[in-house]
C-alpha cells in the first residue's frame, strides 16, 4: 500500500486524467450533480419539517377539540335532531373517567358561531371583538406569548372572578399610541370596567388571531350569563396515549352521559389535531424517503459513469500497462492505481457537489429569511447524512474501480506490448 504515498503514482493518475480532460469532466459532473441534488433536496425537506414544527412549537400536538352538535338518530324516546349542550359537568366527568387525559380546557366565546361580539371601549374609541372565557389550562395547551410586563389569566383570577383581561396586539395598536403602556389600564367590555393585565403576540399556531380578548372563565360566565354551559373543550392526551383512541373513549362517555345512541356520529363534532399532525409527519417522512432514493440513484448513476470511463481508459492504456508490468509493476500496484483514480474522482466530485449544494441552501435561506409566506424554514442538511453520502460514494467508487482495475491486471505484458 505504500505506492499510495509515492509521487509517481499521483503523477501517473494526473497524466491519465489530463489525457482525457473533456471525458473526465463530463463524467465527474454526473457525481457532482448527484451530490448537489441530494444535498439540496434533503435541505428543502428539512426546511419543510422545520416550518411545520415551528407552526406548532408552542402547541400540544396530541390535542383534540370537541363541541356539541345535533343527534342524527333517535334514542330512548328522544327524537333525532336534539341539540347537545356541553357543560362543566361533562368536563368534570371526563376528567374523572378518562385516564388518558393530560389537560382538559373548557372554553366559551362570544363573537363566533352566530353570537354577538364583545363591545370594547377605551376613551372615545370603541370596537367589536371576539371575547374568550378561559382557564389558565389553555395556556398549557396553546402557549400564549405575552409582551414583557404582562401575564396571562391565573387561578386567582378564576377563584375571585376578577375583572381582568388580556388583549391581542392588533387591539393594542388600534387603541393605544406607540410606546403607550396598556398594562394596568382600565377598559370597558360590554359596559363593565376591566383591568388589562397582558397583551399577547399573535402566533402561527394560534386559533384566536391577534384581535381577541381573554377573560377569566368564571368572569365570562357571569357577565354573559352562561351558567355552566360551555362552547367547546380542548383536550390533550398524555404523551404515551394515542389521541385517536382517546377521542373515541371521550365520545363514547359523552354519548352515555347525554343518552345518545352509541352509533350516532353526529351528536358531537370534533377536530383531532394529533391525527392531522400524524398525516403531515407521514408526508414529510415520505418526502425524506423520496429524497434519499432520488439522491442515491443519481449518485450510483454518476459513479457507474466513472467506472465506464475508467474501462475505456484502461483499454486505451493497454500498451502503457504492459510496459509497467514488464518493468516489474506488480498486479496489486496496477490494480491499486486504477482504484485510486476512481476513488479520487468520486471524492472530488462529491465534495464539489456538497459545496455547491450548501451554497444554494445558504442562498435560499438568505432570500426567504423568516418570511411567513414561504413554507420553508432554515433549510439545512444533517452533517452525518452528508458525511454518510460522501463515504458512500467513496465506497461505490472503490467497488466500481475494481472492475477496470481487474481488467488492467488481466492484461498480459507480452500481449500488451504487441498492441499498436
Image: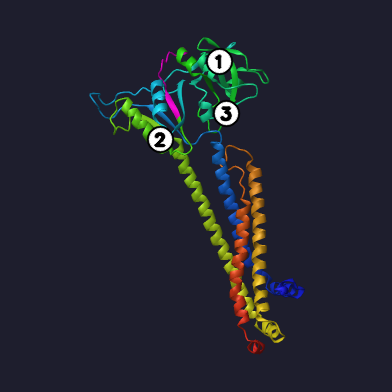
x then y, percent, for residue 151: 60, 22
Q: In this view, does 291 lie above or below 332?
A: above
Which of marks 1 and 3 precedes in the sequence? Answer: 1
Which residue of the protein is positioned furthest toward the left in this rendering?
A: 77
Q: What is the chief secondary structure element of the magenta stretch?
A: loop
Q: Do the residues labelled 3 and 2 touch (CB within 8 Å)?
A: no
Mark in front: 1 vs 2 = 2
Q: Mark 2 points at which residue?
A: 246
Residue 321: image tag? none
Residue 202: image tag? 3
Between 379 and 30, the one lying in front of the other is: 379
Q: Dividing the picture into quarters, in which one does residue 171 lie?
A: top right
Mark in front: 3 vs 1 = 1
Q: Which residue is drawn at 59% across and 56% down?
A: 37
Q: From which residue to which does the magenta span run? A: 223-234
x then y, percent, for residue 106: 45, 24
x then y, percent, for residue 339: 64, 72
Quarter of the picture containing the N terminus is bottom right
Amino acid at each position: 500500500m505504500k505506492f499510495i504515498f509515492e509521487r509517481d503514482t499521483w503523477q501517473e493518475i494526473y497524466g491519465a486524467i489530463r489525457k482525457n480532460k473533456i471525458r473526465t469532466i463530463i463524467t465527474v459532473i454526473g457525481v457532482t450533480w448527484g451530490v448537489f441534488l441530494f444535498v439540496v433536496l434533503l435541505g428543502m425537506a428539512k426546511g419543510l419539517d422545520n416550518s411545520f414544527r415551528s407552526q406548532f412549537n408552542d402547541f400540544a400536538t396530541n390535542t383534540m377539540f370537541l363541541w356539541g352538535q345535533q343527534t342524527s338518530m333517535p334514542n330512548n324516546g328522544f327524537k333525532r335532531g336534539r341539540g347537545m349542550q356541553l357543560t362543566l359537568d361533562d368536563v368534570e366527568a371526563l376528567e374523572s373517567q378518562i385516564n388518558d387525559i393530560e389537560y382538559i380546557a373548557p372554553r366559551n366565546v362570544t363573537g363566533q358561531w352566530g353570537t354577538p361580539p364583545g363591545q370594547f371601549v377605551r376613551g372615545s374609541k370603541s370596537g367589536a371583538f371576539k371575547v374568550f372565557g378561559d382557564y389558565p389550562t389553555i395556556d398549557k395547551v396553546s402557549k400564549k406569548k405575552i409582551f414583557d410586563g404582562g401575564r396571562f389569566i391565573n387561578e386567582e383570577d378564576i377563584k375571585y372572578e376578577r375583572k381582568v383581561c388580556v388583549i391581542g396586539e392588533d387591539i393594542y395598536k388600534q387603541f393605544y399610541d406607540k410606546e403607550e403602556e396598556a398594562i394596568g389600564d382600565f377598559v370597558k367590555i360590554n359596559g363593565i370596567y376591566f383591568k388589562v393585565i397582558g397583551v399577547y403576540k399573535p402566533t402561527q399556531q394560534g386559533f384566536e388571531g391577534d384581535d381577541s380578548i381573554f377573560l377569566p372563565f368564571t368572569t365570562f360566565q357571569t357577565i354573559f350569563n352562561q351558567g355552566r354551559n360551555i362552547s367547546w373543550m380542548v383536550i390533550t392526551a398524555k404523551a404515551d396515549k394515542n389521541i385517536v383512541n382517546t377521542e373515541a373513549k371521550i365520545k363514547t362517555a359523552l354519548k352515555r352521559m347525554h343518552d345518545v345512541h352509541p352509533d350516532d356520529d353526529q351528536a358531537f363534532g370534533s377536530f383531532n389535531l394529533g391525527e392531522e399532525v400524524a398525516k403531515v409527519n407521514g408526508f414529510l417522512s415520505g418526502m425524506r424517503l423520496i429524497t434519499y432514493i432520488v439522491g442515491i440513484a443519481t449518485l450510483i448513476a454518476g459513479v457507474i459513469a466513472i467506472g465506464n470511463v475508467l474501462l475505456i481508459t484502461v483499454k486505451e492504456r493497454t500498451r502503457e500497462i504492459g510496459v509497467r508490468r514488464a518493468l516489474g509493476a506488480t498486479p496489486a500496484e496496477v490494480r491499486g492505481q486504477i482504484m485510486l483514480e476512481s476513488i479520487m474522482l468520486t471524492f472530488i466530485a462529491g465534495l464539489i457537489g456538497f459545496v455547491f449544494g450548501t451554497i444554494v441552501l445558504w442562498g435560499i435561506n438568505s432570500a426567504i429569511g423568516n418570511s411567513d409566506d414561504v413554507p420553508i424554514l432554515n433549510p439545512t442538511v444533517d452533517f452525518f447524512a452528508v458525511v454518510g453520502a460522501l463515504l458512500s460514494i467513496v465506497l461505490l467508487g472503490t467497488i466500481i474501480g475494481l472492475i477496470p482495475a481487474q481488467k488492467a491486471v488481466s492484461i498480459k505484458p507480452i500481449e500488451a506490448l504487441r498492441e499498436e
